[in-house]
Amino acid sequence: MTTTIVSSKWLFEHINDPDLIILEARLDKNQSNLENQFQDIQICGARIFDIKNTFSDTSNPLPNTFPSVVQFNFECQKLGINKTSKIIVYDTIGIYSSPRVWWMFKAMGHYNIAVLDGGLPQWIKEGFPIEPCKEVSYSIGNFDGKLNPEMIRNKEQIFENINTKEAILIDARSPERFHATIRETRVGIRNGHIPGSINIPFETLINNGKYKSKEELIKLIHLKNQPLYFTCGSGITACIVLLACELISENSKAIYDGSWTEWGHATDLPIDQ
């Protein structure tokens, strides 16, 4: 595959490819309060990529943080994923958690991956086959990823960037959270945003569960020739905006994985409102 987004029609036409693996980006709850109507059904043959419980560092008090390389590889192998696998990832909302999985594989050096545009709702809308969710054991795969540290930023690097302005920091949260006109959704987290960051709410890039056209995205996202860093509440919706930027630009891109949950909790770090 040479693309980052595929349609339901494309997936249906390639679904019997022996190297193809379909992953459901499982995230049972979301901070955006988006409704998940399809919790008990899946695309035929899909395998569950459990972001929060299996593909996060659960020893970290911050939510959804990137797991160790050993853990990521081990869990991918348990899902039967190989070095040669062609991965399509979808979520049950449309576009929400799937870009996070896409980015994680990219960060681990596996580039043969794409997001299903519109996810499960679009797949069902077009009448393609589904099945009840079920527990399945797979033959152990030989996936062996290597982490590219340039695709993840920590709070020290984000703090340094406030002064250097080397990269553009893009915040995917709502304008109300960004400008502190409402209280933060997580207890004990300050209101506001990281100084120097700009706000591109992820919802503005999506229409009916699908990414807007490249022409529309270009009008909404004005980029200079600088590296791009992305942040949100906990590293999930930041990946939606990152993937949108990937569709229209070649800028280098990285996720601040701690995001506002880390920054807003740390009283020694500066904020703007």
Image (tube, grey):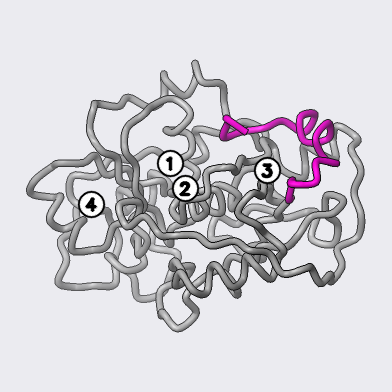
Q: Mark 3 points at which residue?
A: 94
Lateral position of residue 32 relative to residue 28, left or right: left
Q: Farthest residue in the bottom direction?
A: 59
Q: Farthest residue in the top direction?
A: 215
Marks 4 and 3: in contact by CB < 8 Å?
no
What segment is highlighted magenta in the picture? 1-21
Quadrant, the N terminus: top right
- State the CA–CA distance, disc 1 to disc 2: 5 Å
Which one is in front in this view, the residue at disc 3 or the one at disc 2?
2
Residue in the picture at 62% in, 71% down = 75
Lateral position of residue 147 relative to residue 168, left or right: right
Q: Position of residue 6 (x, y in %)?
A: 67, 32
- State the CA–CA distance, disc 4 to disc 2: 23 Å
Q: Name the residue under label 2.
A: 239
Marks 2 and 1: in contact by CB < 8 Å?
yes
Q: What residue type is labelled 3?
A: Gly
- State the CA–CA distance, disc 3 to disc 1: 16 Å
Q: Where is residue 189 in the image (x, y as percent from the top left)?
A: 33, 70
Q: Mark 4 points at which residue?
A: 273
Residue in the picture at 35% in, 76% down = 188
N-terminal of the two: label 4 or label 2? 2
What crowding class fits label 3: few (fewer than 14 Cα within 10 Å), some (14-19), or many (20 or more)?
many
Q: What residue type is labelled 4?
A: Gln
